Amino acid sequence: MSLAHALMTSLLERASSGYDLARRFDKSIGFFWHATHQQIYRELARMEKAGWIASETAPDGGRTRKKLYRVLPAGQDELVRWAQEPAPMLELRDELMVRLRADAVIGPLGLDTEIERRMGLHATRLKVYQAIEARDFPPGGEFGREARLQHLILKTGIMYEAGWLGWCKEALAVLREPALIDHPA
Amino acid sequence: MSLAHALMTSLLERASSGYDLARRFDKSIGFFWHATHQQIYRELARMEKAGWIASETAPDGGRTRKKLYRVLPAGQDELVRWAQEPAPMLELRDELMVRLRADAVIGPLGLDTEIERRMGLHATRLKVYQAIEARDFPPGGEFGREARLQHLILKTGIMYEAGWLGWCKEALAVLREPALIDHPA
DNA sequence: TGCTCCATGTAACACGTTACATGATTGC
DNA sequence: GCAATCATGTAACGTGTTACATGGAGCA
């Protein structure tokens, strides 16, 4: 399990409530590691029980129910330990591959529509990442270690979306080759 | 859920037993959609109950317990229906991104070793895919619709592994920039 | 008053992983 | 005879998803 470690990393960057974390996991961090608020609350409760994090009521005089979590030394130790064990690779496990295979066996299923839809999604995300890059990492800027690593993560997203965008174009070309229509099977 | 649909696609290509499917999901198909034998047996039982597939004892005179599954019309209808609904995108959800972020916040954690390990894994897979491509889709060959789509799927794997291989090189370069060691944080 | 957002949770279910179990066949 | 492989399964658990529930705060 590594949601716990993702959350601790976020908490080290800034002490937060579950709600705050859920929103951050819907934006920046969430582009690379998505989690719902239910998952987050459940995991925070476990981590507190394990002694990795501690909570205090937010310094707003009890106006809200907000709980602020911070990472305890035991939690940081655990994070360091975990960071050094081998990480499982991200598997290429895409339902679209199954659909393409089904299309190959059964016959044309109209997957080009679906691929066009996804091409739009990838293009949108790519633009978002590129906008963030232009804003946070302008060319010519001088950056320290932390910023360079964050930039690397962002560039991973850019590479990823650009790669899939290119793939969509190729896939559409293959699906629409006249030969595929003229000489079925 | 789409393991059921992946299994039906495989069964359409060839009627098989759970054991056969498990082996195929450990090789060719498994490069794009992994599943353990336990998952497969459980899913086959469900699918038979749902009337999507049917089993018969293998035509080996009862020498083995082998059950051969084939897809029923209801199963193929379901597969066609499913193939036409939108497919969830493959999310970039890689523990290594979390580790890089932790490294950015806490300080150097020696992730270059891990990245080198993964670089080896990607390189190995890439070679496997390229060997399959050279064997099954030699340049200059003439292929029908089915083969072209299978080739597209294989090329997806090649693009994917080659992309990550390139990423690993860039990540190593960033992690080893002297500036990152000379001017921490 | 009613709507939206803040903030935290419970419950049930779907899916994937790991460990364990059983027995037959094949090859040395 | 013994080990490896064939072939099928049960059980328990961890994680992720979806639906539902609760109540306060801010604003029109």
Image (cartoon, coloured by chain):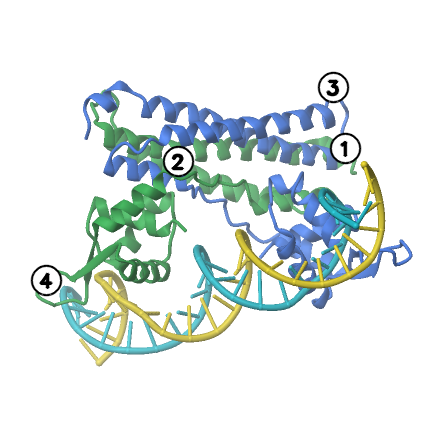
Chain colours: A green, B blue, C yellow, D cyan
Q: Marks 1 and 2, Cα distance to the nearest angstrom?
A: 35 Å
| Residue lying at 79% horizontally and 38% vertically, measured from the top left | A185
Q: Amino acid at mark 2?
A: Gly
Q: Marks 2 and 3, Cα distance to the nearest angstrom?
A: 35 Å
Q: Chain of mark 1?
A: B
How many residues crowd around disc 3 within 10 Å: few (fewer than 14), some, or many (20 or more)? few
Q: Marks 4 and 3, Cα distance to the nearest angstrom?
A: 72 Å
How many residues crowd around disc 1 within 10 Å: few (fewer than 14), some, or many (20 or more)? some
Mark in front: 1 vs 2 = 2
| Residue lying at 14% horizontally and 61% vertically, measured from the top left | A58
Looking at this view, is A164 or B162 the one in front? B162
- Tag 1, which secondary structure? loop
- Tag 3, which secondary structure? loop
Upstream in sequence: badge 4 or badge 2:
4
Mark in front: 4 vs 1 = 4
Q: Where residue A171 appears, x then y in whole percent?
A: 60, 34
> Which residue does the numbered mark 2 point to in the structure image?
A157
Q: Chain of mark 2?
A: A
> Which residue does the numbered mark 1 point to in the structure image?
B144
> Which residue does the numbered mark 3 point to in the structure image?
B140
Q: Marks 4 and 1, Cα distance to the nearest angstrom?
A: 68 Å
> Which residue does the numbered mark 4 point to in the structure image?
A60
